[in-house]
Amino acid sequence: MDELWEGVLPQLRERLGTQNFETWIKPIRAKSPAADELALEVPNKFFRDWLAEHFLASIQELLAQVAQRTVKVSLSVNQHLPPGAAAPKRVERESIKPQRVSNLIPKYNFENFVVGASNQFAHAASLAVANQPGDHYNPLFIYGGVGLGKTHLINAIGHRIVERGPGLKVFYLSSEAFMNELIASLRRDKMDEFRTRFRNSDVLILDDIQFIGGKERTQEEFFHTFNSLYESHKQIILTSDQFPKEIPDLEDRLRNRFEWGLIADIQPPDVETRVAILQKKAEIVAVPLPHDVAIFLASNIDSNVRELEGSLTRLGAFASLTKTPITVELAKEVLQNTLKGNQREVTVESIQKTICDYFNLKLGDLKAKRRTKNIALPRQLAMYLCRKYTSTSFPSIGNKFGGRDHSTVIHATKTIEKKIKADPQMSATIEKLEKNLSVRK
């Protein structure tokens, strides 16, 4: 049996990487107390627990492949073994090569993420996953509009996991990049390498998962990757601009799996949170931002965080290059094409008013429980336009229409989409409504 262990070591080195092999495999002493059993002795309890959680499954799998039979593996502590790199203080960042982490964005961390009512739940869920990956909320699915902080949060999770467990393999990429790597692997006939890379990760973070909708081969491959990671208790983190049930052309088996764990949404930040975001950003980029200017910007730019921060960057650059103090008047001049006062804001409330005016209804009609045709269709149109022109989530839209369930909003949206394809008159009606909303010229 000792020969079996020696025979599997090269494969373990290849699968786990040199750093993990030297840290976690090389210090092990193997013994054979009985046939078809391998006893692995390790230096301490920390080593044993880490090995069991992160590498035991790979050891058992490779032993079975080499032996052509199931091999029972036991772990025990032998304090007389040299500790090697197994003690916690030995496994610090300086001993771990950066290639264990794939593409995490350095600037995004929990320390510079501004928490407000709009993102509090998603932030709390992200912290929980970062502190105990694979334990409770798996997968973690974060959804919300563009530029609201989804990418920031998932990168913060990745960085925190690496800080707490430097030997873990954390992969972060967009779902488009995942598809491109899949295509490249197919062309080069290296699908085994592709599967090994992703299915042996400890944490897989995929941004914009809605991109795989309609892409059958990518969905097929990700389905098996998801299953492999989930069954091994590895953490899966996904983001989307849509609720899982809303993602078009997504296979039901994936849609269902996305709902196995925890779903958290991010809403547009309120004005107080926007002020805090601006102040934090100004501190990071060293822009002297007066409080009255921060309030002015936060009150007039409310589409998303990305635009808010971009506006501060432009304002700061202009002030620096022209040696001009930052004032409200300067902000109005520099950001005149961005500020809300120059364009009509589309909100759930403005859509409801437009629908009521067009169909000669009262707001109470849209919120009432009645399902008569003269009210049901306008209500569905309103919900459809809310999803199209605002970043408000399904549950929040439902709340603004008399406390309806998110599934009602999903049904309304899909109903209108079908009517648009089948009925030219419906398309004409929506075009008129969009003109009234000032979103179509």
Image (cartoon, rainbow, N blue to C red):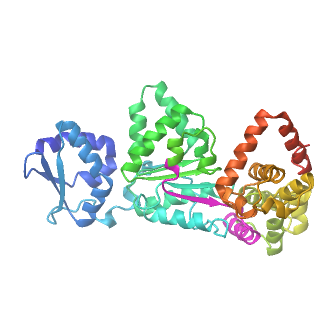
> Which quarter shows the C terminus?
top right
Q: Is the residue 267 above or below the residue 190 in the image?
A: below
Q: Which residues are magenta?
A: 257-285
The x and y percentages for residue 257 are: 49, 48
| Residue beneath the point at 60% across and 34% down | 214
| In-image side of 85 versus 190 (left or right) | left
| Residue beneath the point at 44% across and 48% down | 99
**Residue 318 is drawn in which quadrant?**
bottom right
Q: Is the residue 212 above or below the residue 106 in the image?
A: above
Q: Is the residue 125 above or below the residue 227 in the image?
A: below
**Residue closest to the eye, 34 or 351:** 351
State the residue lying farthest toward the bottom: 291
The x and y percentages for residue 110 are: 56, 65
Q: Is residue 278 magenta?
A: yes
| Residue beneath the point at 18% across and 61% down | 82
Question: Can I make out residue 224 in this image?
Answer: yes
| In-image side of 263 versus 269 (left or right) | left
The x and y percentages for residue 71 are: 17, 45
The x and y percentages for residue 122 are: 58, 63
**Residue closest to the eye, 162 or 117:** 117
